[in-house]
Amino acid sequence: MGDKNFNAYQMAQSQFDKVADILSLDEPTRQLLREPLREYHFSIPVKMDDGTTKIFKGFRVQHNDAFGPSKGGIRFHPMETIDTVRALAMWMTWKCAVVGIPLGGGKGGVICDPHNLSMREQENICRGWVRQLAKNVGPINDVPAPDVMTNAQHMLWMLDEFEVIHGGKQPGFITGKPVGMGGSLGRTEATGFGVIYTLREACIKNKIKIEETTAAFQGFGNVAQHALQLYTKLGGKAICVSSWDQKDQTSYTFKRDSGINYDELKKITDKFGGIDKTEAKKLGYEILDGDIWIEQKVDILIPAALENQVRGDNAVKIADTVKIIAEGANGPTTPDADKIFQEKGIFVIPDFLANAGGVTCSYFEQVQSNMNYFWTKEEVLTKLDNIMSDAFEAVYNTAVKNKLYMRDAAYVISISKVAHACKDRGWL
Amino acid sequence: MDEKTQPADNLVKELEERAKELNCLYKIEEILNHSELSFEEAFDRVVKSIPAGWQYPEITRVKLEYRDKIFTSENFSESDWFQNCEIKVNNNTAGIITVFYVKSVIEFKEDPFLKEEHKLLNSIAERIGNFILHKETFTYISELQNKQDTATDEQKQKWQVVLDMLRKTDKPLFNTIIRKLLHNLCWQEIKEAQQLLKEAGIEQKSDNDYDDDMFDENKPLKKKSVNNVQFANTVISLADEYISDDEILNKLQKWIFEDKCSGLVKAVETLETSLNEISETLRKYYPLISNGDLSPSIEKGLKVSLIRRFFTDQTEYISIAKEFVEISDFYELIDRIILPPKSYGKLGGKSAGMFLASKIISKKTRGSDKFKNIKIPKTWFIPSDGIMQFLHYNELEEVIEQKYKEIEEIRREYPHIVQIFKNSDFTPEFINGVSVALDDFGESPLVVRSSSLLEDQFGAAFSGKYKSLFIANKGTKAERLSALLDAISEVYASTFGPDPIEYRAERNLLDFHEEMGIMIQEVVGTKIGKYYMPAYAGVAFSNNEFRWSPRIKREDGLIRLVPGLGTRAVDRLGDDYPILLAPGQPNLRVNVSFLEKRKYTPQYIDVIDLNTNEFETHKIRNIIAETGNEFPGIRNMISIVKDNHITQPIGLNTDYDNDDIILTFEGLINNTTFVSQIKFLLETLQEGMRCPVDLEFASNGTDFYILQCRSQTKSREIQPDPIPRDIPRKKIIFTANKYVSNGKVPEISHIVYVDPETYNDIGSKEELVEIGRAVSKLNKILPKRRFILMGPGRWGSRGDIKLGVNVTYSDINNTSMLIEIAKKLGNYTPDLSFGTHFFQDLVEASIRYLPLYPDEEEVIFNEPFFRKSENMLKYLLPEYSHLEEVIKVIDVTQSAEGQILRILINAELEEAVAFLNEPMKNKISELDTSEYVEWQPSSYWQWRYKMAERMAELVPAEKFGIKGFYIFGSSKNANAGPSSDIDLIVHIDEKNTDIEKLNLWFEGWSECLSELNYLKTGYQSEGLLDIHYVTDEDIKQRTSFASKIGAITDPAKQLKLGK
């Protein structure tokens, strides 16, 4: 493989190097944080349905646990590489640090394609994974979660195997469990609400009254829906939302200048975030081209759909009225677009911070599981608000103090926090 | 017709008349169905029922004369205004029925009776004739029966009584029996009998020269034997003397029985007998057949003839069906056929498939409880000539020429045709038949399906081309009848719709007369709330042509499962998803991740709304909320989504209104015998029908119904393409020999090729993302379904997009084929996705998937073609021209001088090939000159037939002593497949033929043709000719293949010999 080709791990490292330069980190710190603390590579033998035995390759990377037990998902992917897992583990470290929850970063996976596996075979892979790592993971060491091609079912199998091996109930071993089986309430709302908590704080800092703002949303999935719900509850006026139309295989922007009523729109939306066009028309929504959301004369843009939606070609169309962009989706902005934001002086709440509500809620799930006492939804969301607001404050202050772009500030603060923790522990 | 111009009240009046006539016919049918009634009782009632059916009942009088008796209606008197009709039994007039109007009516013109009334009277007379025949036969049988039962000590008298009776009533049979009796005595070496036989022989011989002096004969018996009575009496007394009474009686019975059956055999074998007559004959003889044991050869012959007359001449079908079908099956079948008068039609492919499948199942599973809940819904059939009679009756024959019009014109005119058909009439006989069927069905909803004759002949799948109509079948009998007739006429009209005609034109089938049978089937289901529907329904295939994992084998099969009516499983709708399952590997699912499982589930359900009498589509979640636990087996069909977790409902706690419910059929799949039963069913039917099958099914929650069954290879979409062997290497773009699934790919004009190597070299994520966006744009601008997408590894990768281009389904939804290239990079070969990221979207849109392994041996991957062809990217999408090194857009037509890319796929051979080829449209009529063009099913036989013609022309007939040259079998009957033989009969002059030389001549041809066929299709065989020599003597004796010459059914066709 040539040097040129894209490698997630190299990319994560160079991103780290850039911030390390800003922070002028010393060499040992760079060396420690550039690479994972620990890696486990192992084989999982599985008896297949047809009687044969197949050996699957499993990984677990614990990038850094200076702040607490490692936290990160388990991926099932046929082309999984250790470099991808390393990169993702590193990002988890920074993500936990930016919101200031006492967890480290980890990631794991198995090389397999669940499309070629029966449920029984998948269960055996899950249990096999836990058997290989039972001593090295756990509520006080490393807490797995669902990721690509794994879900609540896989987590429950893993938890069960773990508890059998350890001879006791330890629901805090894993997160992503269903409510009633050790899961936390508020999980569906967490990411969307988190976006708005940070937006609210950003408005305050930028001396904007949120109740006087207007906003355009991209996407109407889980994140966008709850973000819109809370935004309108806080008095903001959402004037349009774009959503994917499964039947037409394209997206449309639903616009109503008098503002969107969340409950009303939710009623005509299917499980996948598709809005019924006919019903929407009846309610007085204009149905426009899917890309038009970005051109609206609003104060706030909230891209909450897929990655790479705001690019050089369409960022130029952003209206001059736009003051804040809150990234609800993962990686919605390309570097080209970032440059345009900076030129236009738009305040950006980076994805890294804005959508950290999800990981924070996972942390809450673990906390509740450990004490085997579960909070009400209000309790979860209030605690979430506190954590997100504090995190925003910290990133904002760092940005202002050091004249950094918000995206860079978020990295700076999380890496410096981790570096400090390592030093405080006497590792460095 | 001028109906439209008539004032409305006239129209109403006319309609009332039709209803009256129907009622009358119906009543008479009812009376005559009581076979226990005596003639007197029955006829008395019949004449009384008739007046009500006529226009002026109060002045209508009826007289029925039968033999020497007369029956009359009430207040009978005669007048000058009358109509009459003879009652015929076995073509002999047995009576006459006359209808009088006893008072003049103002409107009377020359003929006071309506056209319809004449027809009605004819039908009544015919029905009475049948009744008499049936009854007489019955009397005759019971007489015999009585004699058998009563006489024990008077046995002697008894068999003689039988013979006496025969002597009086049936002379030929009597003679036959006497002769048989005599033969029997001879075998027992009774001297007198031998003597008698000898003389009888001489006697017969001397019949011709009666006046000759028989000088060497001196036995007095000779002269006496001329007297038949004497001869017979002698035989009888000999028999009485030497054979026990019991034995004689037994033999007598057997002979009489065989003689009777020969009547049936004759009736069925003669092509002149109509289905109506066959049905009558079968009804008449059935009590005989079911009691006695037919000799196996007669039975087999009878079965074959019946199969041929009711279903098809196809030898494949017959050879299978005769093993599973019993004569009794036909006896049951004829009661469920609505016969137009004098029908010579067949029931069509769909009906044939269903009939055979049901017999295979019942025969193969006797004694096994695996199929105990498997049923076939109640079905009535209308033979294929029903439509022709409908056209004649309404003088609509010109519609037949519709098919030769321009397709646009057909499309424009079609709605009018539908209207005309719906406003046309059926014959009273037909209406009566439908009415009887309707009584049998009761008020359960019905589906009217087409059962085309072309369907089973040419490997052409007409499914979905002709209409299937659902009717709720609610209301008064008259309303229901009119709705059913309406549906039948609409299905008839669909024969002339633009889609089937276009489809037939494409396959060169236009000139074949399309006649369409109809199946009226009870809709399987239950009433749930105001809806009627099956709990679930679907389609199952023996071969899986959409394998989503390399672990799934083709033979693992495929099930498409939906809630409600099966229409949504049969059709591909694009935006709705049936549950897919491989019965051989039920645990390997298409959709695995949480999001996939949630997205790819049925969203809609087809039902019959009993309030509106309509076939409707509803959102599944609304129906479930509305019906809840009332929906049979609902708990086995649904899963509940909660917190990113999908669970099965347990107990009664499901909240159908508020829970997030999706249809997964998990309970059905995991906790019931459903999957194993379907698997077993597919295996059984595949074994029975000797080919992979395609099955439609439905369940009402308790029983499992088979709705349709046919050979899977019949459907065109998944027919394997022939793979020519003589494609020049330089024209081949790529080949594949792993995980190949059958499917048709249209001619390709553009290729989008994402180069695996340069893609791998891309350094930034942004650029990788851009590739996906460029592909998405190309997807929008390239001609839909005329381009293919080829790219590295896993299309649709998210996250690790280095593994494959980052696209969603909407970015590729216009391609005709998605190709993943597993090109070795360094030391590893990437794992392909098999399209799993949007597999089901591909299936529903019929986008084919093909994996390529270019580094493997014996695989061609024409890299220079991709390298050297001009890249059109910069012209099409200038903004992406910097990606030129990675994305290549090749305009095939431009780079290959007007040629297109043709992709042929054959899963049986596990091979696919893509090559540059001339476009088809210019060459459609020059089949034998065009190279490597895709062969339509019709070209297999056309080519064979043409070759046979050439051979006949070229063979030196005089030199070899050839007198005739005939072709028969599949090449003549237009149903040859890629591996079929060419069956020839060569009539030779035994004395002048040098068989060895002739053989040599044919062998040469045979080898050459076989090689040609291999090159064209990829199917290998040892010689393609099957030659049968026949002599004058053979033809005279009609032995073996000679019998094919001039045969009544499926005769061999003579070809012209050259000079």
Image (cartoon, grey):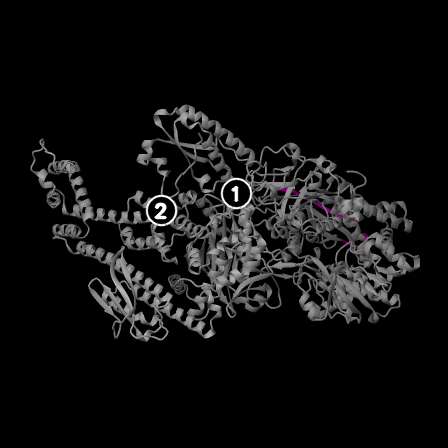
Q: Main secondary structure of the magenta part?
A: strand
Q: Position of residue A227 (x, y in %)?
A: 76, 65
Any magenta on residue A292?
no
Q: Return the residue at label 1.
A: B937
Query: Which residue type does callout 1 highlight?
Result: Pro
Q: Could you tell me the amino acid type at mark 2?
A: Ser
Q: Is residue B1055 above or below residue B653?
A: above
Nearest the eye: B440 or A107: B440
Mark 2 sits on what residue? B305
Left or right of B685, for residue B665:
right
Q: Is residue B465 left or right of residue B77?
A: right
Q: Is residue A65 magenta?
A: yes
> Who's the residue at 31% across and 71% down the image?
B51
Q: Note whether residue A167 is visible.
A: no
The answer to which quarter of the image holds residue B115 is bottom left
Q: Chain of mark 1?
A: B
Callout 1: helix, strand or loop? Answer: helix
Q: Which residues are magenta?
A: A54-70
